Image: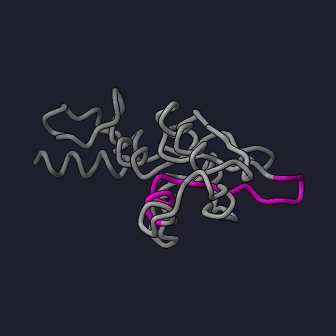
Amino acid sequence: MIGQIIHWLWLGYGLGEATDSQKGHNTMANKTLKETRFATASSVMNKNIVTIEGKQSVADAIKLMRERKVSSLLVNRRGKEDAWGIVTRKDVVNKIVDPGKNPKDVKVFEIMSKPLVTVSPGLALKYCARLFHQAGIRRAPVFDGKDIIGILSNTDIFNAI
Protein backbone atom coordinates (compact mmCIF):
# COMPACT_ATOMS: atom_id res chain seq x y z
CA MET A 1 0.00 0.00 0.00
CA ILE A 2 2.77 2.47 0.89
CA GLY A 3 4.52 1.68 -2.38
CA GLN A 4 1.31 2.42 -4.29
CA ILE A 5 0.87 5.77 -2.50
CA ILE A 6 4.43 6.81 -3.30
CA HIS A 7 3.92 5.71 -6.92
CA TRP A 8 0.80 7.87 -7.14
CA LEU A 9 2.65 10.79 -5.61
CA TRP A 10 5.42 10.34 -8.15
CA LEU A 11 2.88 10.35 -10.96
CA GLY A 12 1.45 13.58 -9.60
CA TYR A 13 -1.92 12.47 -8.27
CA GLY A 14 -1.48 14.82 -5.31
CA LEU A 15 -2.32 12.53 -2.41
CA GLY A 16 -0.28 14.70 -0.06
CA GLU A 17 3.25 14.46 1.18
CA ALA A 18 4.68 11.05 2.02
CA THR A 19 6.48 10.71 5.34
CA ASP A 20 10.28 10.58 5.46
CA SER A 21 10.16 6.86 6.24
CA GLN A 22 7.98 6.29 3.19
CA LYS A 23 10.29 8.33 1.00
CA GLY A 24 13.46 6.75 2.30
CA HIS A 25 16.48 8.77 1.24
CA ASN A 26 14.95 9.94 -2.03
CA THR A 27 14.05 13.41 -0.84
CA MET A 28 15.07 16.94 -1.59
CA ALA A 29 15.01 19.04 1.59
CA ASN A 30 11.38 19.91 2.42
CA LYS A 31 10.13 18.86 -1.02
CA THR A 32 7.48 16.33 -1.96
CA LEU A 33 8.15 13.73 -4.60
CA LYS A 34 5.76 15.64 -6.83
CA GLU A 35 7.85 18.82 -6.53
CA THR A 36 11.11 16.94 -7.13
CA ARG A 37 9.70 15.41 -10.30
CA PHE A 38 9.36 18.85 -11.82
CA ALA A 39 12.72 20.25 -10.69
CA THR A 40 14.71 22.05 -13.36
CA ALA A 41 18.37 22.76 -13.99
CA SER A 42 18.12 26.27 -12.54
CA SER A 43 16.44 25.06 -9.36
CA VAL A 44 19.38 22.85 -8.33
CA MET A 45 22.40 24.28 -10.20
CA ASN A 46 25.44 25.71 -8.46
CA LYS A 47 25.58 29.47 -9.01
CA ASN A 48 29.22 29.60 -7.90
CA ILE A 49 30.91 29.92 -11.29
CA VAL A 50 34.69 30.12 -11.10
CA THR A 51 36.46 31.19 -14.31
CA ILE A 52 39.99 31.15 -15.65
CA GLU A 53 41.70 32.38 -18.80
CA GLY A 54 42.85 29.74 -21.28
CA LYS A 55 46.35 31.25 -21.45
CA GLN A 56 46.94 30.67 -17.72
CA SER A 57 48.96 27.67 -16.60
CA VAL A 58 47.43 24.45 -15.34
CA ALA A 59 49.30 25.16 -12.08
CA ASP A 60 47.18 28.34 -11.76
CA ALA A 61 44.05 26.28 -12.43
CA ILE A 62 44.97 23.74 -9.74
CA LYS A 63 45.60 26.52 -7.23
CA LEU A 64 42.28 28.21 -8.07
CA MET A 65 40.33 24.93 -7.79
CA ARG A 66 41.83 24.30 -4.36
CA GLU A 67 41.24 27.86 -3.13
CA ARG A 68 37.62 27.97 -4.31
CA LYS A 69 36.92 24.30 -3.47
CA VAL A 70 35.55 23.45 -6.92
CA SER A 71 36.14 20.52 -9.25
CA SER A 72 35.94 22.47 -12.50
CA LEU A 73 36.65 25.90 -13.93
CA LEU A 74 34.83 27.63 -16.76
CA VAL A 75 37.37 28.85 -19.32
CA ASN A 76 36.50 32.34 -20.55
CA ARG A 77 35.87 33.04 -24.21
CA ARG A 78 38.49 35.05 -26.07
CA GLY A 79 35.77 37.03 -27.84
CA LYS A 80 32.06 37.10 -28.69
CA GLU A 81 32.45 34.53 -31.49
CA ASP A 82 34.48 32.12 -29.34
CA ALA A 83 33.05 29.25 -27.29
CA TRP A 84 33.47 28.70 -23.56
CA GLY A 85 35.61 25.83 -22.36
CA ILE A 86 35.86 23.82 -19.17
CA VAL A 87 38.76 22.28 -17.31
CA THR A 88 38.15 19.67 -14.60
CA ARG A 89 40.14 17.79 -11.99
CA LYS A 90 39.78 14.75 -14.25
CA ASP A 91 41.45 16.69 -17.09
CA VAL A 92 44.35 17.56 -14.78
CA VAL A 93 44.80 13.97 -13.60
CA ASN A 94 44.45 12.37 -17.06
CA LYS A 95 46.32 14.95 -19.14
CA ILE A 96 48.97 16.24 -16.71
CA VAL A 97 49.61 13.79 -13.88
CA ASP A 98 49.29 10.54 -15.86
CA PRO A 99 51.70 11.52 -18.67
CA GLY A 100 54.07 13.15 -16.15
CA LYS A 101 53.83 16.73 -17.41
CA ASN A 102 54.68 19.77 -15.31
CA PRO A 103 51.50 21.82 -14.67
CA LYS A 104 53.56 25.04 -14.80
CA ASP A 105 54.54 24.26 -18.40
CA VAL A 106 51.06 23.52 -19.78
CA LYS A 107 48.37 26.09 -20.55
CA VAL A 108 44.72 25.56 -19.63
CA PHE A 109 43.61 25.78 -23.28
CA GLU A 110 45.77 22.73 -24.05
CA ILE A 111 43.78 20.41 -21.77
CA MET A 112 40.30 21.97 -21.60
CA SER A 113 37.16 20.63 -23.27
CA LYS A 114 35.63 22.94 -25.85
CA PRO A 115 32.98 23.61 -27.10
CA LEU A 116 30.71 22.76 -24.19
CA VAL A 117 27.44 20.93 -23.90
CA THR A 118 25.10 23.35 -22.11
CA VAL A 119 21.61 23.04 -20.65
CA SER A 120 18.85 25.62 -20.47
CA PRO A 121 17.61 26.80 -17.06
CA GLY A 122 14.13 25.33 -17.53
CA LEU A 123 15.23 21.86 -18.64
CA ALA A 124 13.79 19.12 -16.42
CA LEU A 125 16.36 17.16 -14.43
CA LYS A 126 15.38 13.87 -16.06
CA TYR A 127 16.38 15.30 -19.44
CA CYS A 128 19.57 16.76 -17.99
CA ALA A 129 20.44 13.31 -16.63
CA ARG A 130 19.72 11.72 -20.00
CA LEU A 131 21.87 14.30 -21.79
CA PHE A 132 24.75 13.77 -19.35
CA HIS A 133 24.57 10.01 -19.87
CA GLN A 134 24.38 10.19 -23.67
CA ALA A 135 27.13 12.82 -23.95
CA GLY A 136 29.38 11.09 -21.40
CA ILE A 137 29.70 14.20 -19.23
CA ARG A 138 29.38 14.86 -15.50
CA ARG A 139 28.55 18.56 -15.54
CA ALA A 140 27.30 21.26 -17.88
CA PRO A 141 26.99 25.02 -17.71
CA VAL A 142 23.45 26.38 -17.50
CA PHE A 143 23.04 28.88 -20.34
CA ASP A 144 20.07 31.28 -20.47
CA GLY A 145 20.62 32.32 -24.09
CA LYS A 146 22.88 35.21 -23.15
CA ASP A 147 25.10 34.19 -20.23
CA ILE A 148 26.16 31.17 -18.25
CA ILE A 149 24.22 31.45 -15.00
CA GLY A 150 25.39 28.32 -13.20
CA ILE A 151 26.87 24.85 -13.40
CA LEU A 152 24.76 21.69 -13.12
CA SER A 153 26.49 18.46 -12.09
CA ASN A 154 25.54 14.83 -11.60
CA THR A 155 25.93 15.51 -7.87
CA ASP A 156 23.34 18.31 -8.05
CA ILE A 157 20.91 15.98 -9.83
CA PHE A 158 21.58 13.16 -7.37
CA ASN A 159 21.05 15.45 -4.37
CA ALA A 160 17.70 16.58 -5.81
CA ILE A 161 16.11 13.12 -5.72
| Residue 4 horizontal/vertical position (percent) | 18, 51
| Residue 34 horizontal/vertical position (percent) | 38, 42
Q: Nearer the viewer, residue 1 or 126?
A: 126
Q: Nearer the viewer, residue 101 or 121?
A: 101
Looking at the image, residue 111 lies above or below residue 32: below
Which residue does the image show at 47% across and 70% down from the upper left?
Answer: 136
Q: Is residue 53 left or right of residue 113?
A: right
Q: Nearer the viewer, residue 112 or 45?
A: 112
| Residue 84 horizontal/vertical position (percent) | 73, 55
Residue lying at the far right of the rendered structure: 80
Q: Count of labels shown? A: 0
Which residue does the image show at 55% across and 54% down from the upper left?
Answer: 103
* Quadrant of the drawing holding the C terminus: top left
Question: Residue 48: which quarter of the image?
Answer: top right
Looking at the image, residue 4 lies above or below residue 133: above
Q: Is residue 104 left or right of residue 9?
A: right
Residue stretch in magenta: 78-94
Which residue does the image show at 52% across and 31% down from the upper left?
Answer: 68
Q: Is residue 49 left or right of residue 154?
A: right
Identify the colour scheme used.
one colour
Looking at the image, residue 69 lies above or below residue 143: above
